[in-house]
Amino acid sequence: MSGTLYAIGVGPGEPELLTLKAVRIIREVPCLCVPKGKEEGTSLALDIVSKVLSLEGKEIVEAYFPMKKTKSSEHYETLDTRWNTTVEEIVTRLKRGIDIAFLTIGDPTIYSTFFYLHDRLLELNPQQRIIIVPGVSSINACASRIATSLGLADEKIAIIPATYIEELKDILITFDTVVLMKVHKVIDKIISILKELDLLKKSIYVAKVGMEDEAVYYDITKIRDKDLNYFSIMIVKK
């Protein structure tokens, strides 16, 4: 019998945000598949889990996924190869009846690498048992950190990856709340547009929410270079 694959959201960085269900499954499975952004680096998801659970005796399969735009033809071939390699690693174990937990930062259903694997796995075996365990997303964590509601009554919310967006001005005009993810590479452009729309004072920047080096800026014009990183979110609320 084929093993079960669990996709587990481990939250944005604070170990106490792991759900009880996530902890139980991670404790029970013999194998963890953990993504990492640098080949020579470590897995942030695994680091979060290791602060809550003992990983002694578990097989750890590392999956290296460069933090690149998936829609870019320049990077897609490299990513495609990485995804296929990870699928092979997972399938080999599932065929032997081994249950695997794929750990992902935040929630598996929100801009997560996991679904690139999910679709490939089901192409190979449509009957494969895959269980998705939701986690606290960085979006929720950031809103909680700055004590703001993302939406009330008929307010409209937009959640977009900032590095892809070309219609940012129109979106900021149309929606009541805009959550910009991964803003670090386009921060100057974003600040310029926010200034033009007189929204600077309605924008808050949060980096590495829930982590030890978390940073929050209520004045986004004062963001320091050291706080510009991949794990960054800006919430604009009118």
Image: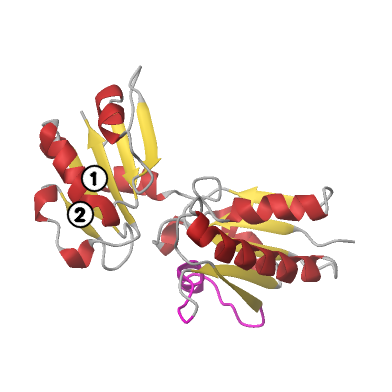
| Front position in the image: 165 or 10 | 165
Name the residue at 39% across, 50% down: 138
Query: What is the x, y in percent for residue 43?
Result: 49, 72
Query: What is the x, y in percent for residue 109?
Result: 55, 45
Query: What is the x, y in percent for residue 52?
Result: 49, 69
User: The N terminus appears in which quarter of the rendering?
Assistant: bottom right
The amino acid on which the numbered mark 1 sits, given as a three-letter code, is: Ile
Q: What stretch is highlighted in magenta?
A: 40-58
Q: In this view, does 91 lie above or below 170?
A: below
Q: Is mark 2 on a helix, strand or loop?
A: strand
Q: Is residue 171 above or below residue 184?
A: above
The amino acid on which the numbered mark 2 sits, given as a three-letter code, is: Val
Q: Is mark 1 on a helix, strand or loop?
A: loop
Total marks shown come to: 2
**Disc number for residue 146:** 1
**Disc number for residue 45:** none
Q: How far apart are marks 2 and 1 (CA)?
A: 8 Å
Q: First in sequence: mark 2 or mark 1?
A: 1
Name the residue at 79% across, 70% down: 92
Q: Per the image, is 46 magenta?
A: yes
Left or right for 37, reference 238: right
Residue 90 visible, this orientation: yes
Q: Per the image, is 146 magenta?
A: no
The residue identified by callout 2 is 216
